[in-house]
Image (spheres, rainbow, N blue to C red):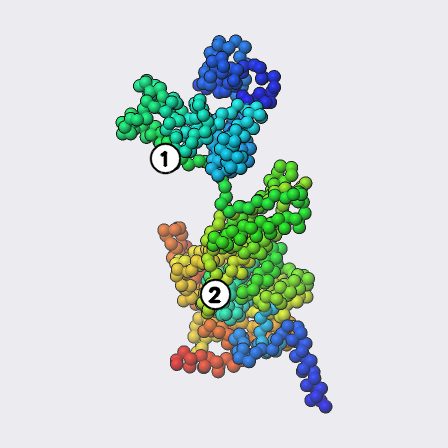
Amino acid sequence: MTDWLTLRQPKLKDVPFVLAGPERNRIVIRAANALAQAQGVHTGMAAADAKAIVTNLKVLDDIPDQPLKLLKALGEWCIRYTPIIAMDLPDGLVLDVTGCTHLWGGERACLKEIVTRLRSKGYDVRGAMADTVGTAWAVARFGKVKAIIAEGEQQDALLSLPPAALRLEPLILDRLHKLGFYTISKFIGLGRTAMRRRFGDGFLLRLNQALGTENEPLQLLQPIEPYSERLPCLEPINTAVGIEIAIKTLLENLCRRLAGEGKGIRTAILKCYRLDGQLVTAAIGTNNATHNISHLFKLFELKIATIEPALGIELFTLESPKAEDVEPEQEILWVPEDCSLTDSRLAELLDRLTNKIGASAIHRYLPQEHYWPERSIKTTISLKEKPTTAWRTDRPRPSILLPLPERIDVTSIVPDYPPMLFIYKNKTHHVKKADGPERIEREWWLDQGDHRDYYQVEDEVGQRYWLFRSGHYSADNKPQWYIHGFFA
Amino acid sequence: MYDAKQHIINKLQKDILQWQGFTPPKAGMLKGIGLGPMERAFPNGVFPTGNIHEMICPTPEQAAATSGLMSGIIAFLMKNGGACLWISNGRKQFPPALMTFGVVPDKVIFIDVARERDVLWAMEEALKCEGIAAVIAEVREISFAQSRRLQLAVESSKVTGFLLRNDPSKLGTTTCVARWQITSLPSQLKDELPGVGFPRWQVDLLRVRNGNPGSWKLEWADNCFIPLEDEEELLQQLDERRAG
């Protein structure tokens, strides 16, 4: 952090300075530069104490979140060495260089390259290489003899180091110190049960992680998509035709790989890195996993218009965050009864529609076991879901159902009989024929209210309606009539 | 002399129909789609699949009647497999009712677009897709050029399209093979029984390309259309079928 500030303000180079911020009503030092550290100033010290030690100490305000940003930027810069990079807060980077070192001519050369490159930029870095993250961490910070620990020599390397090299909590460090364990060699031979009893599970975990007997997962800076393709361009691309060719090339490579593994794309993201440093993305989704290039290209084709190339695009990447097993297509000997919805052409059509107008526009309905008309169907997203109950045809249901029943005025002579005439939208309809009533009770466990008595009625010109009366007749209450649908 | 002329004219008519894409039905496929004598109004006497039909339904009552008759036709089209797409903007169709007319509602995919102009785009995309039995779209306005695009799409894919026109003031010239208007008729039950009978419609073909417009009466009973001219005879047959 102080190195970064020195780079920004060269005149700070020859001055001992610290970055400090408030903590519990005190100004505490968060970072100190090499000059200050040489005179005994360390992080965690109160700024006032440090000033007493070093008279010409310069105290600068700490910028919150800046160390994190800086570390992240450095980590991203390091992706040139290996794709697997994790941040080790507050001041470390973990690089998994397995299988990458030969590119730099061996482990020693690789480590030297990384450290010298960073040092040449003005950062004070220390590096170490070992089989486990724990040992590398310890050696990088406390090691004095050698920076590269050979395979299986973690224990030997750790022996002479202080317990703080094990990434332990301050409380445990304090306790170890009190017991006189100044180096790891003093306690590494003790019984495991005794150590667990005294220092807890966290202590053993750290020790095992350093020795390599326990796995240590890394939180990657940039997670690697298992299915992704890159296409760097010699010349920046700024035409639609160029983008089309790029998408086709990427899809061909990715789909060849997916097809070999029997996988298909469910979602894909095209990232276009522009010359001016901006990133443009276009995403598509499919209903069924597919590795059909022409179909996927059609989906991207709809998005090309939204890609703004500006000065030009220098790098395309295509990632598939969601890839699923493809159902193998089978030669069909006979047409099964229910083949209509499994047709891949239909799925591809729906993909195109989904990508243009959105998935919320596409509905498919299945029957639901409710008599209440509004609840008698449910929507389904999947094309493969089969109805769990049969569609009922024993009761008449109208072809057109109003989303909300509309009030009508009726004339009826006998209660519990269909009306003689009704007025809907200022038009009087004389009822000539009627069927009913079909009483549908409200499902009291879902909502409250009156039941409905449905009548199917036909007027003098043959138009058929679905009317209902809400509630019972009683002496002082005249129930309201509604129209709810139109029959064919 | 006269016969020879007539023969030449008949031959020419057949040729023209073929050039326009109406192939004469193959032997064994003459059964039709169940519309009865009405089918004679169409070229070659066959209901034209792989074409676009236009249905006028300005009122909800007519929309319901149209939906009924159309579902009956679609049920025949879907017999060979294939799904059906229903594209609209503000749909009121109640899916379970399709079952009454022989269409399994879960094989119909409803596409409810938010904007009117997406309806035609979606319909064109759907019509281009082979393997679909029918595409229905509720359209308020369509220009001749737009209808020609749809016609080009169905010519290669052989999908049957239905345009539901709910605004009769916007009717223009289109490339549709037929223009239908369906209105409800009072139903009748046998022996003066009370109650509502099977749905009945008056079907008017206002315009048929290379065919004969006309007016017919149909009833939907027992999962098939029954033409009402020889109704008595057919009802009798129906009874026999039920009995035996």
Q: Nearer the viewer, residue B3 or B38?
A: B3
Q: Residue furthest front?
A: A105
Label 2 Cα neighbours within 10 Å, binned few <14 / some 14-19 / many ≥20:
few
Q: Is residue A29 above or below residue A428?
A: above
Task: Name the element at disc 1.
Answer: loop
Q: Is residue A89 above or below residue A223?
A: above
**Cα gap from disc 2 to disc 1, whole angstroms:** 50 Å
Instruction: Tell me which numbered mark, 2 or 1, is placed earlier along the sequence.
Output: 1
Report the chain holding disc 1: A
User: Residue visible at 53% across and 53% down?
Assistant: A256
Q: Is residue B174 left or right of residue A63?
A: right
Task: Name the element at disc 2.
Answer: loop
Q: Nearer the viewer, residue B141 or B162?
A: B162
Q: Residue furthest bottom?
A: B1
Label annotation for residue A331? 2
- Identify residue for label 1: A214
Q: Amino acid at mark 1?
A: Glu
User: Residue visible at 45% across and 67% down?
Assistant: A336
| Image coordinates for residue B212, horizontal then vertical, percent | 63, 76
